[in-house]
Amino acid sequence: MTVQVEINEALGREYEAGFISDIESETFEPGLDESVIERISKMKNEPEWMLEWRLGAFREWLKMEEPDWALVDYPKIDFQAIAYYSAPKSMKDKPKSLDEVDPELIRTYEKLGIPLIEQQMLAGIAVDAVFDSVSVVTTFREKLYEAGVIFCPISEAIVEYPELVKKYLGSVVGRKDNYYSALNCAVFTDGSFVYIPKGVRCPMELSTYFRINEQNTGQFERTLIIADEGSHVSYLEGCTAPQRDENQLHAAVVELIAMDNAEIKYSTVQNWYPGDENGKGGIYNFVTKRGICHTSAKISWTQVETGSAVTWKYPSCILKGDNSVGEFYSVALTRGRQQADTGTKMIHIGKNTKSTIITKGISAGRSNNSYRGLVKMMASADGARNFTECDSLLIGDKCGAHTFPYIESRNPSAIVEHEATTSKVSDEQLFLCRQRGLDPEKAVSMIVNGFCKEVFKELPMEFAVEASKLLEISLEGSVG
Amino acid sequence: MSNTKSLLTIKDLYAGIEEKQIIKGFNLDIKPGEVHAIMGPNGAGKSTMGYVLSGRDGYEVESGSVTFNGQNLLEMEIEERANAGLFLAFQYPVEIPGVSNLEFLKASVDAVRAANGEEAISSSELLKQAKAACKQVDLPLAFLKRGVNEGFSGGEKKRNELMQMLLLKPKLCILDETDSGLDIDALQLVAKGVNSQRSEDRSFIIVTHYQRLLDYIKPDFVHVLADGKIVKSGDASLALELESQGYAWLENGNVEAKIEG
Ligand SMILES: Nc1ncnc2c1ncn2[C@@H]1O[C@H](COP(=O)(O)OP(=O)(O)OP(=O)(O)O)[C@@H](O)[C@H]1O
Ligand SMILES: [Mg+2]
């Protein structure tokens, strides 16, 4: 057996979350105009100001061009061929408790390893489960409420906490920010809302699990996390979708606000359907994630990206307050024909702001994996520092790894350091592992896991195990 | 002894890499419990022999047979050979960054156990054994947490190979110049490690350039490998002879003839 064949076999695993749930849904006809937005707003019982906000974004979007600077290649998206709302019929009457939720929905999440029944859940983790365009259930809400923490679907927050939403929605990612975020502002359907009051350490991990089920439907979720002064929260999002031959669009916006001395840890395990090995099907993942740090606040993004046909995603930090800290830890694995263009932006405004960027790109098959990062030191950022490390690992010789670091410094006292390496899973490493008894599959996944260790250790413990398992399963693709 | 079953029998083996024949008519018979030293000039094919026996990709066998513990070794996958008890300590151990030594040891031990129908070793038992092995090869315990060979010095890498051997308890240990690059203390340590593992059901092939090591490990046989085959075999005293006279007297005209041809 040649090394190539072995690696192929090691990589040859199926996408495990690819099943379709048989759930009766209410789905809009494909197409997008102002009336569709009005319908979405109505479905959600939104106040007038929200509808106006959406329509304003839509009008901006119409004037914008789809960006083409990323190193990704996909056919033009027909935005009129997408349905912008889909929800299980059973959700129409807003189930009051889990007993009223369609058991098929609960089973779907169970199959994905996310039990929604509180007794069965991992203690210490609250989950918001979003299915297509609606939130199905949010667990542990009462327990969190006792601590003063608000964790609910954003559609509900718009109605229940309009002041908070009005003040912060769009405050970090403006409506005109970019093409996909403008679209999201116009048509977003659900997502999570989190508010941690002053000085509170959120007693549980919060997590949202996104599932796209319906065909030809886009998922446009919106997440808003506000950590008030001196508070602390750790939040995790996970995502999967069925295996379908058509591409599906996912354009999310996440905004984080870390007030003075607050800390937000945001982790993502992204496992959208990546398409088959010839590049048929899969999710287009065009996501805008950004956080703002006030004085001495800290935002830490950790992402493990294994899915999607195309990923376009740059979780960023605006380090506005003095002494604030931004971190970005990323593992991006591409295989088959997957394309990922991902990275971060660290905008240093305050004095003595610090940022750390550590990325691990793994490319296999005929995939393309790019790191794109911007470190910007504003004139005001005296004593600011950045450290960037980008490592790429190639499996086989038909894949690509690229690094695009952009550095803009307007402050001579700011220090920016950048390191980059590219390596291969070598014949020698594989041989050593096998000589010690490991089969090729285990050997490759162990080597890749080792490569990612620096990032995995940033994930909450339960998820670090999940992530390395996911990596093992995701090491699919062909090197031939 | 002579009617004990052999652990390893190599017959008329011809093998090489990328069309280049390197092993040219190799014969060797090893019985359980025996220690065989293989010496020979650079480029003779000693490392190649170890790779061929362990089944490394790219190494092609042209003809001949190898029987290991009653099985046709040449038909087995690399990991099957390992799990059947064949262990190769590398001349140049490779680094696996980020994979801790302990993790690697557990995966290896578990693989061998699984192949023998045993269940995985408990983490506490593994840790206990690993600590003992660390001590035996004189590596600080902190090395268990470090990445496999990651940033290890040459000598530390060699000790690490021995540590793996101690935990895996193979039937046949092939040590490829495990003594090269070691200081005198470490040399004794390797010898001690080997001697402590000598037993009736474990055999060794020790590839070395130095008689020194063989002072501490008394081999049952010494072979000289030159140009892909064994040109002389003897007992431990052969190593002493080689030390004083070099290899030239064994190869006599061969090398020159080749250069001229
Ligand atoms: N990939 C390869 N392609 C071609 N020739 C090779 C290759 N690998 C090894 N050789 C050759 O095979 C011969 C035997 O090499 P080998 O490493 O087995 O020698 P050795 O006896 O272990 O030497 P040393 O004592 O220096 O370790 C050498 O001439 C070497 O150059
Ligand atoms: Mg050698």
Image: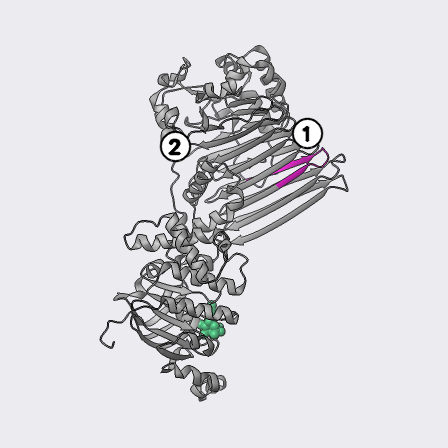
- Mark number for residue A295? 1
Circles 1 and 2: CB distance less than 8 Å?
A: no
Query: Disc 1 beta carbon < 8 A from ligand 1?
Result: no
Residue A437 lies within the magenta run: no
Q: Give how far apart the Cα atoms at labels 1 and 2 are.
A: 39 Å
- Please tell me whether the stretch drawn in magenta is mainly helix, strand or loop: strand
Q: What residue lies at 45% left-to-right and 88% top-to-bottom?
A: B249
Residue type highlighted by circle 2:
Leu
Between A404 and A455, the residue placed more toward the observer is A455
A350 drawn magenta: yes
Q: Residues within 10 Å of mark 2 (few under 14, many from 20)?
A: some
Residue A138 placement (x, y as % from top left): 45, 22
On residue B215, the disc is none
Q: Chain of mark 2?
A: A
Q: Quadrant of the N terminus of chain A?
A: bottom left
What is the three-letter code of the residue carrying label 1? Thr
Question: Relative to A272, does residue A203 appear above or below in the rendering?
Answer: above
Q: Which of the numbered marks, if any, corresponds to residue A112?
A: 2
Q: Position of residue B221 (x, y in %)?
A: 35, 78
Does residue A85 appear in the picture of this structure? no
> In the picture shown, does residue A164 fall above or below B108?
above
Task: Answer with the quarter of the image where residue B136 lies.
Answer: bottom left
Do pointers 1 and 2 mark residues of a single chain?
yes
Q: What range is drawn magenta here? A: A341-356
Left or right of residue A173, residue B96 in this image:
left
Query: Depth-wise, is mark 1 or mark 2 nearer the camera?
Result: 1
The local secondary structure at tag 1 comes to loop
